[in-house]
Image (tube, coloured by chain):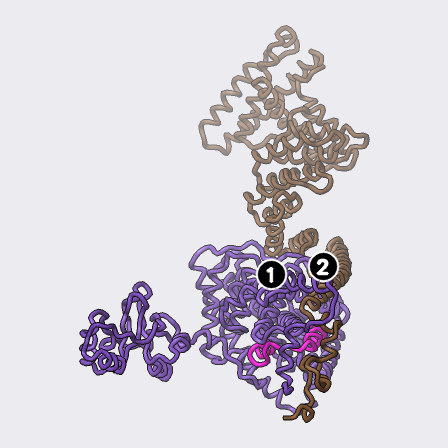
Chain colours: A purple, B brown
Amino acid sequence: MSATGADAAAPLAAESPPREAGRLEQLWSLWRRKTLTLREGQLFLLLAVVIGIVSGLIVVCFRITIEWTHFWLLGSSMHPSPLRVLLAPTLAGFGVALLVMLIFKGSRGSGVNQTKAAVFIFDGHVPFRTVIGKFVTCALAIGSGQSLGPEDPSLQMGAGIASALGRSLKLSREKQRLIAPIGAAAGLAAAFNAPISAVIFVIEEIIGTWSGGVLGAVILAAISSVVVMREFLGSAPMFRVPAMEFRSPVELIGYAVLGVVSGVASIVFLKFIVYFRPRLKQLPRWTQYVQPAAAGLLIGIIGIWLPQVMGSGYPIIDQALHDQFLWRMLLLLGLFKILATGISFVSGAPGGMFAPTLFIGAMLGGAVGGVEHLLVHRPAESVAAFALVGMGTFFAGFLRVPITSVFMVAELSGNYSMILPTIIANMIAYFISRRYQHVALFDFLARQDGFYLPSIEQMREQNTLRVEDAMRPGAGIVLRDGDPAELRREAEASASAQFLVWRHENGWRAISQDDIRKQAIAESGSSSEEIPGRGPLPQLYPDQALDEALRLIGNWPVVPVVNRANLEKLEGVLALDDILQAYRKS
Amino acid sequence: MAEGDNPRICPHCGNPLPAGATQCPRCNSRLSLILHSRETVLSITVAIVIVLFFLTGFITRGYHEKLAAVGEQWFEAGERQLHAGNAGFALEDFHTALVYRPDDAQIQFRLAEALAADHRDGEARAYLLGLLARNPSDAPINLALARISATNGSEAGALRYYHGAVYGVWPKNPETNRLNARLELSRFLVGRNDTSIADAELIALISEIPQHGAELHAQAGDLFLRIGDAKHALSEYRSALRVKHPSANSVRGAGLAAYQLGEYQEAERYLERAHRLRTSDADVTSALVLSRLVISADPYLRGLSEAERRTRTQRDFAQAFFRLRACAKKSANVSTSAAPQSDLAMLTSQAKALQPRLTERNLRLHPSQVNVAMILVFAMEDAATKECGEAQGIDEALTLIGKFHQGRER
């Protein structure tokens, strides 16, 4: 017997061998198989719920750990003592660097890219060690005042939990690859208390396509995690937004200005990271042990005067939404938060960019609103409205997720009255950011880390080639079915080697000059019998994607492209050469 | 390849398979099969989830308790600062408290009050409106908003929110708080000289003041007095004075109210008492002097003997005639207008004609002459006031007697 390892694996993995067992055991086994064994699709949905619950629980613990760390290191005051402000992020930064360099090597960065890399490169594999590492190092970094947020790490932790569960359950490779984004959505949804935004972000940035196979599971996981999170931390939206409304279209001018300001600011922030991150990475390895500590020290120095820029900054956003700062202070906070977050991020300290992005957006938005209030004498609540819209606008410009940003503003605040200004300002910021920074942040970071991941932004905007782009007219190829002799005459008169014939009983069929000749010889001049041809042929429609056509065309030399409302009506024909030609041209 | 050359490896556990075996004995053991089945993994996962659930619950409870404690600590610090009048420091403390207890309406409310105390009305208003949206019938929120509106001079807003405070829900001492809110509203309206609405609010207020609420009665009396409703003012002061140790302010107010109503004897009584209680001011002194003059000059005063009434009539007539003549003389030197001169001349001739008839004997025989004489006295005083300026001393007293008497007759 010469079975390879793989050969042996199949029976081992599939079913248990027949063994000597009692009748009771056999009955149990039979019942178990019939009732308890789930098909993979069902298991996948059940697993999505379980992933959601576990991710929700982990994210709750993560947030609490960050808070405890903050209490422990910086105290409960909004204005800690200068000594604490200097020492806490510096020493914690050093500890974080040691952990990241020696124990949890996969815990650097925000987590979004790593999750994306897991999906596209490692078959959805996120090591569980990364989950633990992310939890510990991010709690320490964010809790000590590094200007980073807990959302992106939560996303990666969710993906890690999902991946671990998928591996334990020996899911197929395809499902393993899909399960990481499900966990990512669950983690992000729990961190943001915003299931819709989390689902859209995962679709928009990590998966890249609205795949029906995974969408249901992603939604289930996101909702489960949010339900769990709300059970423990309450159901209030992340920000308490005061009463505000969009009154008149004239106000859109102000929001358009906000879009421009946010677009420019996001370029500044992106350029800062693009310039400094690779340079710091190129420094000798030993410096990476001190970079987060140095970043912590710099942030501490800023924090002595502006403690608001330390940590995720959610309470400060809440204050900005309640008109607690003058426009100059808001502008100052926005600019220094860009600096502090840039320093934290490029130093390699683990932590996310979502919360700082929202902070910067809110501050810049509030500043623009404050100036507008002075110039146009709008009501005071307009400053809060600008801060709210600003969050989404900067998010759209910096992270390049325009759809997520719109939903996020509505979901985080529980306020849907500002959707229109948000859309307009977001689009302006997004287009400015695209115009002056061609590569999106996550794509850039991935390339720096040596991963050439598909750019979701480019994928999103790529033109899908369709059958109508490649097909050619069917003139001279289609023969009228009816009298075989006449069909033969028509074929002989044509220069084409292949013909298509529509037959009511069995659809489109292919007939070649050879078929016609052979039939003629067999009949010896009689015209009584129909030429059988080959088929039925697969039929294509003009709106079908060309890669789908490529799969359907098989070995057929030419296939008909027909009208969806009338299958007899030939819109054109398509051959393999036509498809290749279209791809070459695109 | 021969079997023995390359030992086969179990794909699950990685251990080499024994020669001739088609299945891994480790992985194929009953225990291993049970442990690696999907059902088992799922069951273990569910068990872990349950444990994790309880663990998270335990951690979360501790976390919430800590947050509540820290929030409370900062809230109390804020309260201390606010009571000490340091609104700026209180603000910081309340902000910090709110970080730990973001949904605590009490902290938000106190923060709004601190903001208002720090003259940051816009921010305070934003917080309060948010709170009001959640609980529109909350009386303290309405009152705080009313105060902000009142400070900003928005009468409509102040009225709306003050009424919200009056008719809203008070968590503690609803009756007292409602009364105080209405009193504050009345004070706001009086301050804006909106006398008709203020009078209505004050009348509504006094119906709710309990009998023993001397201080409230006194405050209501003050407000009535300020809008010129002396009748209600005196009534309120009288209520305030029913207590064992009435306030000096109530005595003073009662005196002034009685004086305005022409109740000079009562006014004299209260004003003298106020004088003794050292709450005397220019108003009280002037009112007391005038009250005394009125009492000494008024021939219509109840309880006077007929002889005294006649004597007062003669004296008042002589005083008024004297003033008229002095005024006519002065007027003849200065004035160029003809009409007043003719009035003064007419009254002088009437007085000259009446004077011989105002003898003791004649007045005793014809008591109705007292009225005739006094009507002329009032007319002379009025004409002299019109022509030569406000009356002083006894002439002012006579003018007041005239007004009071004519008003009573009407």
Residues A58 and B66: in front is A58
Crowdedness near tag 1: few (<14), some (14–19) or many (≥20) residues, C-alpha within 10 Å: many
- Asked whether residue A309 is in view, the answer is no
Q: Is residue A141 rendered magenta in the image?
A: yes
Rendered image quadrant of residue A540: bottom left
Per the rendered image, the range of residues in magenta is A114-143
When the figure is inspected, residue B383 is found, relative to residue A107, above or below; the finding is above
Q: Is residue B271 rendered magenta in the image?
A: no
Name the image quarter holding the C terminus of chain A: bottom left
Dominant secondary structure, magenta:
helix
Q: Which type of secondary structure does the marked residue at label 1 adopt?
A: helix
Name the image quarter holding the N terminus of chain A: bottom right
Tell me the residue at 48%/27% (across/down): B340
Image coordinates for residue A555, horizontal then vertical, percent? 37, 80
Numbered mark located on residue A223 in the image:
1
What distance separates the C-alpha of mark 1 from that of mark 2? 31 Å
Residues A534 and A198: in front is A534
Residues B156 and A476: in front is A476
Three-letter amino acid code of the residue under disc 2: Ala
Image coordinates for residue A348, horizontal then vertical, percent? 65, 81
- Disc 1: which chain? A
When the figure is inspected, residue B399 is found, relative to residue A44, above or below; the finding is above
When the figure is inspected, residue B401 is found, relative to residue B44, above or below; the finding is above
Residue A482 horizontal side relative to residue A505, left or right: left
Q: Which type of secondary structure does the marked residue at label 2 adopt?
A: helix
Three-letter amino acid code of the residue under disc 1: Ile
Numbered mark located on residue A571 in the image:
none
Residue identifier under label 2: B97
